[in-house]
Amino acid sequence: MLRISILFLFFNCKYIDKKSEVKWKTIEVGDYLFDFPQNFRLIKEQGIDSYVGRIKGNDITFEFDFGFYSNDFEQTVDEYLKDGDWRGLIAFQFMKDGVNYDDRNMPNVEIINIRPATAKDNSKNKKYDFVAECVYENSKFEYPISIPDDIKNQNFSVDTIQNVYRKIVFSRDTKNGITGIYLAKTDGNVALSMFTSNLTTAQQKTVLKIFKTGRLKIQ
């Protein structure tokens, strides 16, 4: 009990960045707590099936959604290779005219390996990122994969803390693209997404610092 009380006091006290002398405070968003500079304030809004709102500072505004359908942003490269739409496109080349296809009778293509593309794999007009080694009806073939620009234009940080899956995305071009965080309990159904955009490089650094303070509320 003493340990919980100490943690509660630590997380809810005002934090001071000694280097910049900026005072910080804790704001609760759904199941999570974040530390923000003192000038930020929580603005609750009316959602249909989730808790939505904004956290507004002097020159940065976050939008958030806490619920069952929160946006998990762009796929990472690993996620795209595992679940991207390129997998569904492979089967199309083996479809036959006059046959009605559905989930039960799609051509069954087995992907046995994915490797980085080499200079030899690339054509004059197309640069590929990976090559999938596949098998269809006992015949082996290779399928080139291009990672979408929307993914290439983002940086990603993905890990698990406190049994919470955490994905942080931050645009390489801070003025174009989003900087956001997605948090989802590994044993739950609801998640939090929070993001902002149109940042300077310095503002993006502040946003990433805020995101790194995200943590589960003490129950």
Image (spheres, rainbow, N blue to C red):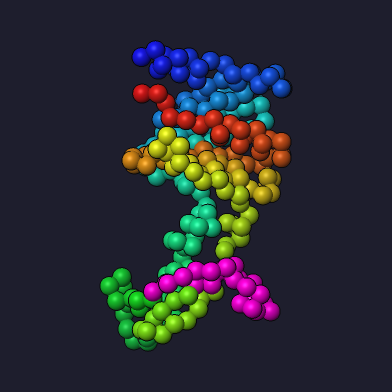
Which corner quadrant of the image does residue 107 belong to?
A: bottom left
Location of residue 96 in the rendering, given as x and y in whole percent from the top left corner: 37, 86
Residue at x 42% of width, y 72% of height: 111
Residue at x 49% of width, y 72% of height: 132
Identify whether 153 is placed above or below 57.
Answer: below
Which corner quadrant of the image does residue 129 belong to?
A: bottom right
Residue at x 49% of width, y 60% of height: 80
Identify whether 142 is placed above or below 25.
Answer: below
Location of residue 86 in the rendering, given as x and y in whole percent from the top left corner: 48, 68
Q: Nearer the viewer, residue 216 or 39?
A: 216
Q: Nearer the viewer, residue 22 or 3?
A: 3
Residue 191 visible in the snapshot: no
Residue at x 45% of width, y 34% of height: 52
- 15 vs 80, left or right, is right
Residue bounds of the magenta highlight = 110-132
Outermost residue to the left: 104
Q: Quadrant of the N terminus?
A: top left
Residue 73 visible in the snapshot: yes
Outermost residue to the front: 3
| 119 drawn magenta | yes
- 28 vs 57, left or right, is left
Location of residue 175 in the rendering, given as x and y in whole percent from the top left corner: 69, 45
Which corner quadrant of the image does residue 95 belong to?
A: bottom left
